[in-house]
Amino acid sequence: MGKIIFYEDRNFQGRSYECSSDCADMHTFFSRCNSIRVESGCWVLYERPNYMGYQYILTPGEYPDYQRWMGFNECIRSCRIIRNTTGPFRLKAYERPNFEGQMMEFSDDLPSIQEFFHSREVHSCNVMDGAWVFFEHPNYHGRQYLLERGEYRRYTDWGAMHPCSGSFRRIMEF
């Protein structure tokens, strides 16, 4: 299904922990995480136990230090595998809460929300197919939020403190 290896030190050094399924609390396996190797699957990592805190979306590849996955620090405490990464991909984004206002449907990545919406923000979203990551800033930067199939009536439903005014992309395993 998936395989990810966490390392305490940069460049895949130090104590390591191999994971192949969801893990709600990893603090007993390592004290810090400075590098990661994703061998298969797409993963969402969380800075706190029980799938809370900042989210980091990782696809297969090597991440020799936490800045490579846009991490704010070396703290990873839970993870889970992301499903629905093979497509099709389809979402409807709305400029107001509760699926109101201007709506646009997407099946591809969007590097800048501000270029498509009059209000320049997404307040609600309906993910019909696939898994997506919303970013706080344009061009896929800033905080990340995983959106899987389902309805998100308000931006707080996907864990954000503000409407999404940045960008979003499909989560695909290559």
Image (tube, helix red, strand yellow):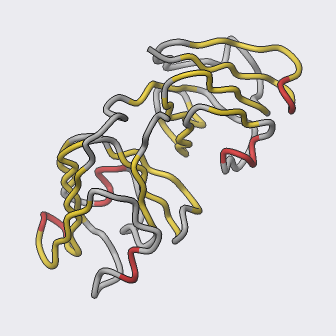
Q: Residue at x 46, y 31 (%)?
A: 51
Q: Quadrant of residue 125?
A: bottom left
The residue closer to the viewer here, 5 or 8, is: 5
Give the vertical position of 81 relative to 72 (above or below): above
Q: Residue at x 56, y 42 (%)?
A: 56
The residue closer to the viewer here, 8 or 31, is: 8
Q: Residue at x 13, y 65 (%)?
A: 99
Give the percent coordinates (x, y) of residue 147.
34, 46
Give the vertical position of 158 relative to 5 (above or below): below
Give the percent coordinates (x, y) of residue 103.
16, 72
Which quadrant is the N terminus positioned in? top left
Q: Residue at x 53, y 12 (%)?
A: 20
The residue closer to the viewer here, 6 or 112, is: 112
Image label count: 0
Give the vertical position of 75 relative to 5 (above or below): below
The residue closer to the viewer here, 12 or 48, is: 12
Give the percent coordinates (x, y) of residue 40.
54, 22
Give the percent coordinates (x, y) of residue 19.
58, 13
Answer left or right for 128 relative to 59: left
Q: Residue furthest front?
A: 174
